[in-house]
Amino acid sequence: MDSSKKIQIPVAYRASILHFLSDPGAGNGASATEFFEDGILLIENGLVAELGPADKLVNKLPKDIPVKDYTGKLIIPGLIDAHIHYPQTDMIASHGEQLLEWLNKYTFPTEGKFEDQEYAEEVAAFFIDELLRNGITTALVLATVHPGSVDAIFAASMARNMRMLAGKVMMDRNAPEYLLDTPESSFHESKALLEKWHKVDRLLYAITPRFAPTSTDEQLKQAANLAKEYTDAYIHTHVAENKKEVKWVAELFPWSRSYLDVYDHFGLLRERSVYAHCIHLDEQDRKRMAQTGAAAAFCPTSNTFLGSGLFNCVGALDQDIRVAVATDVGAGTSFGMLQTLSEAYKVQQLIGQKLSPLRALFLATLGNARALYLDDRIGNFLPGKEADFIVLNDEATPLIKRRMAVTDKIEEKIFIYIMLGDDRVVDSTYIMGECAYRAI
Ligand code: GUN
Ligand code: ZN
C-alpha cells in the first residue's frame, strides 16, 4: 500500500478538534492552542487542506465532498514516540533489575533472536499494529545489531505508509559475542541501510550507537564519520540514564568531562540527534544540549520501572532544550503515550514541577515533531501538513465516560484522557488521510 502516490478524494472530518501552534507552557497562553468544539478538518491527497469551525466551513465545502461525522469525539494530531526499541516487544515487563543487569539478563538474549529474519518480520508487524492501536503514527525506533532487523521495521512501516525513523544498533564491545559488530562493519552496514532507506517514501535513517559503554572510541568515530557524510540523517543513542552506568562511562573514557562529553567529543551532538534519558546531566551538559539543538527524550515509565531517576522535564524546557517524550519500550511499561504522559506528570510532581495537561499533549504531538525537526511535516493541522491524526472516544470505559460528563473544559478532558486513558480511548488512527486502525 502506498497511499502517498494514490490520489485521494477530499474528505472532511467533523468532530471536536484540538492541536497546537506552539508550546502552551512557554508563556504563549491561549495563542498556542487551537480548539474547535465543532470543527472541520479537510484532507486532500493525504495532506491537511483546511481546519476551522464547522459553522464557517460546512457551507463552503463543495457539495460532493463526503463528510465523515465524528461528532462527540475528539480529533488530535497523531501521537509521536521519540524513543522506542521494537525488538524489546517480547520482553516488556521483565521483573526485578536496574539498567545494566536488565540489559544482560533480558535485553541482549532477546535481541539475539533477531538473527532470524522471519522472527524480526513477525515482531515488526506486531509492533506497528501496536503503535497504531495506541494512536502513534510516528516513532524513532532502535532495531538490533542485525541489518535485517532494520529492513523488517522499515518494510513494515512502508507497508502502512508511516513516517518512521529507525536504525541499526552499533555495538562492538561489552555485550555477548553474538551481538557484536566492528567499527568497520557497523559503518558499512549502517551506510548501506542509510542509502537503502533514508528519505524513501516517509522513512528516515538514524545512526544508532547503542550507548557509549558498548562502543569503542573507534566505533564512535565511525558513527561520527557517517553523520558528517549524511548531515540530514539522525543520530540516536542513550545517555546518563543510570548512576552505575555514568560511573562506568567515566572509567571507560577517563579523558571525558562527563558522559555527554563523550558524544560531544566525537561530534555526535547536533541538530537531529536524540539522546534518551538525560537524567544525570550537569549544568554544562544541559547548556550543550540547548546550544547544539540536540533533543533529550524523557522516558518516564522506563525511568521509574528501572529505578533510573527523575528527569526534570519542565526545567529542561525552561532551559530551551528540545525535550521529547518517549515510551522506551521494553524498559518502558506501555506502548501508550497517554500512560507515558500520566507517568511524566507524576514524575514532575515528585520533583515539585507542574506539567499542565495541554503542555503534556503538546509534547507528544508538535513538541516531539519539533524535537525531531519534523514540525514542517507533522505534529499539527496547519495546511500542507501530512494528515496523520487520531480520533479519541471519551466514552471508552464506564469510568472515563462518567468522569468526562462532569466537565466540558477541554483542558480537564485532556487531563482525564492522560490519567485514565489507554489504547481503549483510541477510536481510529489515520495515516496520510487513510484509516489505518479502527477499534472493533
Ligand atoms: N541503554 C543502552 N541500551 C538500552 C536499552 O535497550 N534500554 C534502555 N532503557 N537503556 C539502554
Ligand atoms: Zn532506550
Image: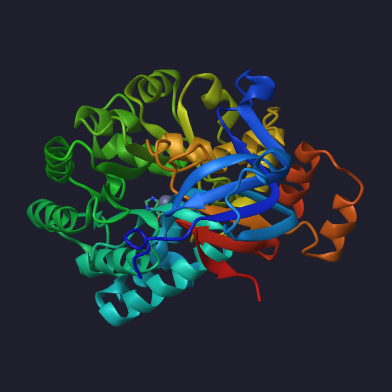
Q: Residue at x 67, y 46 (%)?
A: 58
Q: Would you say 21 lies left or right of 186 here?
A: right
Q: Would you say 372 lies left or right of 43 here?
A: left
Residue 428 point in image, percent of width and height: 61, 63
Residue 306 point in image, percent of width and height: 54, 52
Query: Most extreme residue toward the bottom, as rendered?
Result: 118
Q: Residue at x 85, y 59 (%)?
A: 401
As drawn, 50 above or below 417: above
Q: Is residue 198 visible?
A: yes
Q: Would you say 132 lies left or right of 360 here?
A: left
Q: Is residue 422 visible?
A: no
Q: Nearer the viewer, residue 305 or 343?
A: 343
Residue 227 point in image, percent of width and height: 18, 39
Residue 176 occupies which quadrant of the picture? bottom left
Residue 377 occupies which quadrant of the picture? top left
Residue 67 point in image, percent of width and height: 63, 58
Question: What scheme was used to colour the molecule?
Answer: rainbow
Quarter containing the N terminus: bottom left
Q: Nearer the viewer, residue 418 or 142?
A: 418
Q: Residue at x 29, y 28 (%)?
A: 261
Quarter containing the C terminus: bottom right
Q: Nearer the viewer, residue 249 or 385?
A: 385
Q: Nearer the viewer, residue 59 or 386?
A: 59
Q: Residue at x 70, y 29 (%)?
A: 354
